[in-house]
Image (cartoon, coloured by chain):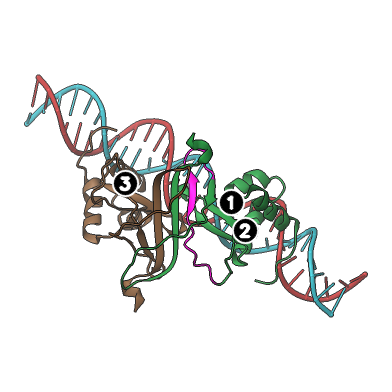
Chain colours: A brown, B green, C red, D cyan
Amino acid sequence: MGVIRKTKAVEVLLAAFDTKAVALSAKALIDQLGTTFNKTTIYRVLDKLEDDGVLHSFLGKEGLKWYAKCHGCTSTAHHDVHPHFQCLNCGKVECLAVSVTLPKIPNRKIEVSQLLIQGKCEECFI
Amino acid sequence: MGVIRKTKAVEVLLAAFDTKAVALSAKALIDQLGTTFNKTTIYRVLDKLEDDGVLHSFLGKEGLKWYAKCHGCTSTAHHDVHPHFQCLNCGKVECLAVSVTLPKIPNRKIEVSQLLIQGKCEECFI
DNA sequence: TTATTATTACAACTGAGTTGCAAATGTAGA
DNA sequence: TCTACATTTGCAACTCAGTTGTAATAATAA
């Protein structure tokens, strides 16, 4: 693991999440920054930022991996049932600041859960 | 599209879902039946069965595509908020016969939603 | 049985994500 | 500021689930 270093790649990637303020897919980041940084680097930095609890990840439609800034998650406890909304029209993904009540499931130990809601976002709704 | 034909592949695949009674990943089916049928065939039959509303699909962890028999879904209306449980220990996936109350989201049109719950299943819980 | 149409196998491909390794870079300590 | 060393990066080659084109084969209607 080791300490996280303030490199160009880390800086630029974190900035992307700040300015965009939404979730971003690894692929989108590579499309956008692939000429500046190698795609391997981008994957590895995202991985590390997730390990450190700075970002969290989830799978969007088509199995693409998405990342978003964590708000109130720590690297150890990351059990939040935190829904994501993906627009089927423009593809944008947002984190929803709502909590979800999970169904009761007997005899099973729930560790993580992912709720992905798909539909039309505010802009594409019109 | 056309009518669905009762071929060997369709027969065997449907039988797998009946006997196993759980969700199966495309990959698992190919591992298991790949010597009997070409993987392309398996993907295409699963696709068609989904189109016809016989199976429904969703993404498990690692982005693998899983299929399960539909109960009370039609090919047109497939809007069920139908949670899936995946065991992080043995990898098994089950459909949960529970309904989930979605959070209220203003100004957005919800079309589909997928809730994937991960943890330890009844057998691995012990 | 035949004509028609869907289905299958095969091989080659796609594309997101991974791996190994040598070169480059950041950081702590002198 | 300089040095030593561990971390990070780029590159190229790879993995692997899933897709595509096409010719051959099999299921159905007539």
Q: Residue B81: say if magenta.
A: yes
Tag 3 residue: A46
Q: Which residues are magenta?
A: B77-92
Name the residue nearer the viewer: C27 or B85: B85
| Chain of the residue under the numbered disc 3 shown in the image | A
- Look at the image and tell me in which quarter the C terminus of chain A lies: bottom left
Check contact, mark 2 vs mark 1: CB within 8 A: yes
- Which residue does the image show at 70% across and 67% down from the upper left? B4
Mark 2, Cα crowd under 10 Å, few <14 / some 14-19 / many 20+, is many
Regarding mark 3 in the picture, which secondary structure is present there? helix
Q: Position of residue A105 (x, y in %)?
A: 46, 49
Quadrant of the rendered image containing residue A48 = top left
**Direction from residue B102 to residue B93 in the image, left or right:** right
The chain letter for the residue carrying disc 1 is B
Dot 3 alpha-carbon crowd within 10 angstroms: few under 14, some 14 to 19, many 20 or more = many
Residue indicated by mark 2:
B46
Are the residues flagged by discs 3 and 1 from a single subunit?
Answer: no
Of D19 and B120, nearer the camera is B120
The label on residue B5 is: none
The residue labelled by disc 1 is: B26
Q: Specify the principal SS of the magenta part.
A: loop
Q: Position of residue D22 (x, y in %)?
A: 68, 63
In the drawing, does residue B16 fall left or right of residue A97?
right
Distance from label 3 to label 1 (Cα)?
28 Å
Q: Quadrant of residue A88?
A: bottom left
What residue appears at the point 65 percent right and 59 percent down from the top-left corner? B45
Give the residue type that dot 2 points to: Leu
The kind of residue on which mark 1 rests is Ala
Where residue A109 sits: x, y (%)?
Answer: 43, 42
Q: How many marks?
A: 3
Q: Amino acid at mark 3?
A: Leu
